[in-house]
Amino acid sequence: MSAPFEPDSTVVAEVAPSPNHDERPDGQAPDILLLHYTGMPTAAEALERLRDPAAAVSCHYFVHEDGRVVQMVPEGRRAWHAGLSSWERVPDVNARSIGVEIVNPGHAGRLPPYPAAQIAKVIELSLDVIRRWGIRPDRVLGHSDVAPERKEDPGELFPWERLHRAGAGHWVEPAPIRERRVCAIGETGEPVRALQARLASYGYGIPVSGAFDQATAAVVRAFQRHFRPARVDGIADPSTLETLANLIAARPAASR
Ligand SMILES: [Zn+2]
């Protein structure tokens, strides 16, 4: 097993070292806070897996349903939670992020709501990490944002709005849903290209091809999960387009 270490955050209740980490390349400082759900039936199974050398996965922080925070990897080390991923055209999100696993069985476990005590600690921990590393609001992300074709965590019930109101993460009020659909799989042309360019400019890993393909639908779904969770269908309806435009317009100046 890995050696014990001093926790990086005062929010930590317990250190449970994982052997699964390596060096951050070129001393890269973390500039992304990446949030996950564990997606396993119990917290104990998830903890065990995150400490299993054979599983080769880990995170920096693990937040129990009652809000207890466990640190598993020192922040200065590269934990293994993002997998194949990209944001703002830079791959290897693990190299530049702090990873937080939030106990929740996920979509496979019927996506129960996150308990208030758990979210309160996630917020406290996020604010602490953001402050110490100077992480930009629009770089507080979900796993599905950086790996839209593979992942759907932390899911559409994750309270991004509450985090934002507490000072963690970028968010705008979603535009109301109207029924007219404008852009979906199979369509091609300038509106599709413009949509892809906007999603890419926000940070999503998406080719600007002008063809609305499966990959585009996956990115639209990831965007909706985070920013327009009332309907996650991969269709770029007017509400989705408007929410994206508002999000970009409201982006903190330093991020543009
Ligand atoms: Zn994840």
Image: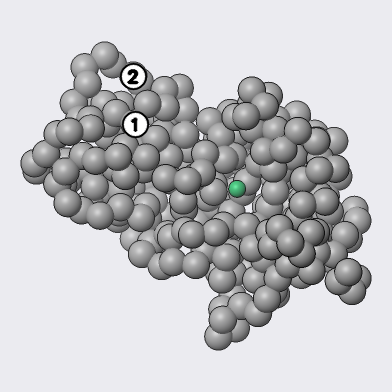
Looking at the rendering, in which quadrant would you find the C terminus? Answer: bottom left
The image position of residue 138, as x and y in percent, is: 47, 53
Give the distance between the C-alpha atoms of the residues marked 1 and 2, in whole angstroms. Answer: 14 Å
Q: What kind of residue is marked 1?
A: Gly
Q: Look at discs 1 and 2 and give the one toward the viewer.
A: 1
Find disc 2 in the rendering and name its residue: 177
Specify whether 43 is left or right of 237.
right
Q: Which residue is mark 1?
A: 234
Q: Considering the numbered disc 2 on the image, is that residue within a helix, a strand or a loop?
A: loop
CB of mark 1 near ligand 1 (< 8 Å): no
Give the x, y percent position of residue 66.
85, 35
Above or below, 169 against 152 in this view is below
Few, some or many residues within 10 Å of mark 2 (<14, 14–19, 20+): some
The quadrant of the image that shows the N terminus is: bottom right
Decide: few, some or many residues near mark 1? Use Cα within 10 Å; few <14, some 14-19, many ≥20. many
Residue type (three-letter) at the residue carrying disc 2: Ile
Closer to the camera in the image, 151 or 227: 151
Above or below: residue 180 compared with residue 232: above
Q: Quadrant of residue 179?
A: top left
Q: Measuring from the top left, give residue 13's x and y in whole percent.
A: 90, 53
Determine whether, in the image, residue 198 is placed left or right of residue 230: left
User: Does residue 9 appear in the picture of this structure?
Assistant: no
Q: Quadrant of residue 149?
A: top left
